Amino acid sequence: MADNYTFVVQNAGVRIDRFLTDNIPEITRSAVQKIIDEENVTVNGEVVSKNYKCRAGDNVDVTVPDAKPLEAVGQNIPIDVVYEDEHLLVVNKPKGMVVHPANGNPDGTLVNALLYHCGDSLSGINGVIRPGIVHRIDKDTSGLLIVAKSDKAHIGLAQQIKEHSFSRAYEAVVYGNIKEDSGTVCQPIGRDTKDRKRMAVTMKNSKPATTHYEVIKRYGDFTHVRCVLETGRTHQIRVHMAYLGHPVAGDAVYGPRKVITRLNGQCLHARHIGFVHPITNEYLEFESELPEYFTSFLNYLENR
């Protein structure tokens, strides 16, 4: 059955989505916004939008509908499980695997593999198409990804990402010779105003984004780098490195027109992940070996 909540607003000025997130902690803000968009929230008997600002004395009624039947189905696809307990798991995603079903990729995704591996033991916060998915990496980016088995674990992990206490480090090979041994890109990222499929450094409808980088080794016209994310925007490393004039090798979206086809996508690997276990409070840290496509390209650069 659907869950129903009733509140009386004490303090004016807060947005309705923030008010409900604060008062129903087991539901994320994105889930609250979806509930509002589906007209399951009324204030003084009237449907409101998610940016409605509450007034003192407002009567707020909320209906949280039952979860919809899962639309994605489990498939027996092998996955590299680095760590697993009853609350979460860490997987090492291969290059070329899409994280969750979407138009053009209805199955064969990590979510399909997780549904087969975990059954019903995945958080439902991100809906029926993205069960358990706390954060994503691109199809052609390989490496570590954390998956939540329960809503409580999901909320705890999402909060760490929001507070930037969730440690994520990537390795990449980028075009050109980066002169500095290390540096930081602190530039906002939003949708490219000329191409909605791309992200860009822009001041319009953007969010703050910070990437720290350091050089591992130089190969003349290419540089092997380590990138540490302070924020987690879509395509963040790819956009920021391109902004520096050093796009990720093999990146057909943000790199030069003549892409390196031998890489079959960008040379970018999510190598390190560290976080506080949302249930046990134990600090966990994992490292992933560079995959064959990456080491093969490094060997090519070394020996050409």
Image (cartoon, grey):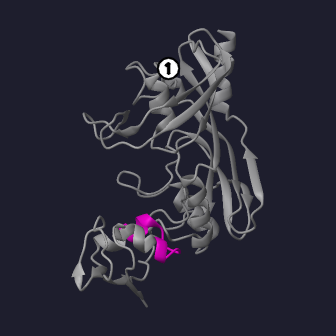
Closer to us: 230 or 105: 230
Measuring from the top left, give residue 249's x and y in whole percent: 52, 24
Closer to us: 251 or 229: 229
Q: Is mark 1 on a helix, strand or loop?
A: loop
Determine whether 137 is above or below 1 in the image.
above
Relative side of 22 to 216, left or right: left
Relative side of 191 to 243, left or right: left
Picture residue at 41% right of the left edge, 86% below the top:
5
Determine whether 196 is above or below 252 in the image.
below
Q: How many marks?
A: 1
Q: Which amino acid does label 1 sit on?
A: His
Circle 1 packing at 10 Å, graded few (<14), some (14-19), many (20+), is: many
Picture residue at 34% right of the left edge, 34% below the top:
202
Picture residue at 41% right of the left edge, 44% below the top:
207
Measuring from the top left, give residue 157's x and y in whole percent: 61, 60
Measuring from the top left, give residue 201's x and y in whole percent: 38, 32
Measuring from the top left, give residue 258's x and y in whole percent: 40, 18
**The residue stretch that appears in magenta:** 22-33
Identify the residue at the far bottom of this view.
1
